[in-house]
Amino acid sequence: MGMAAAMAQRDRPGRLTQWREGLRRLVRRSWSFFGGLLLSAAAIFALVALITYQPSDPSLNTDAAGPVQNWMGSPGAWTSDFLLMMLGPTAALLLPVILVIGLRLARGVEAGQWLRALLVTSLGSAVLIALAQLAADRGLKEGIALLWLFRNAYVVILIEQYWSFI
């Protein structure tokens, strides 16, 4: 029995290490799964809110006292108004991409380097939009046209860049 106890003592650190590593993988996978579900649910919520958008709903840009007609209620009216204000109708094109990213995360599919590409694309677009905003603030009419162009081009670039991801 002395030898069996010695063997058990020697194997214990290996088993404990394996248990800890397994627990880490479980936690990482759980975060990925629930984060993917949350991202997918948010994309579906925003898509339904955009589809059922009513200009007369009380929201950020509308001071209305009537009942909310958006299927997602008051949060849906505010969300759709905000998305339309920031991205225009092209916001609906970005939501399926977000939905697919969420589904891929929930399924545990490797995402590749999409996060780095998203950050680089977003940072570059933010710089261009900020420069166009400065031009528009200084009274240049071209700045307003550039803002519109960059906003729409940003969405198109995102969709084209992640088309292979879908």
Image (cartoon, rainbow, N blue to C red):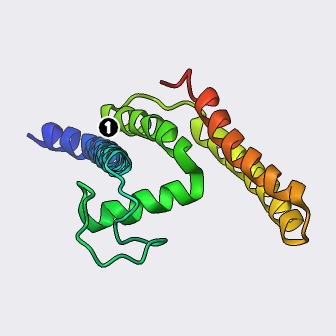
Determine the residue positioned at 32% across, 60% down: 76
- Residue 27 lies, in percent from the top left, at 31, 50
Q: Is residue 157 left or right of residue 111?
A: right
Q: How many marks?
A: 1
Between 93 and 100, the one lying in front of the other is 93
Please give the name of the residue rendered at 27% of the width and 48% of the height, measured from the top-left corner.
16
Up/down of 155 relative to 54, above or below: above
Rendered image quadrant of residue 134: bottom right
Q: Residue pushed farthest top?
A: 164
Q: Work out whether residue 26 or residue 78 is closer to the camera in this orientation and state it.
A: 78
Residue drawn at x 85%, y 57% is 143
Q: Please state which of residues 153 and 84 is positioned toward the viewer in this rendering.
A: 84
Helix, strand or loop at disc 1?
helix
Q: The N terminus is located in which quarter?
A: top left
Left or right of 21 in this view: 5: left
Q: Which residue is mark 1?
A: 106
Residue 108 coordinates in the image, percent (x, y)? 35, 32
Task: Examine the image and state in which quarter residue 65 appears.
Answer: bottom left
Kindly identify the residue that appears in the image at 43 percent across and 35 percent down: 96
**Residue type, label 1:** Ala
Dot 1 crowding, Cα within 10 Å, few <14, some 14–19, many 20+: many
Q: Is residue 113 left or right of residue 105?
A: right
Q: Can you give x and y, in whole percent of width and height, for residue 161 in the image?
A: 64, 29
Residue 164 location in percent, x, y? Answer: 56, 20
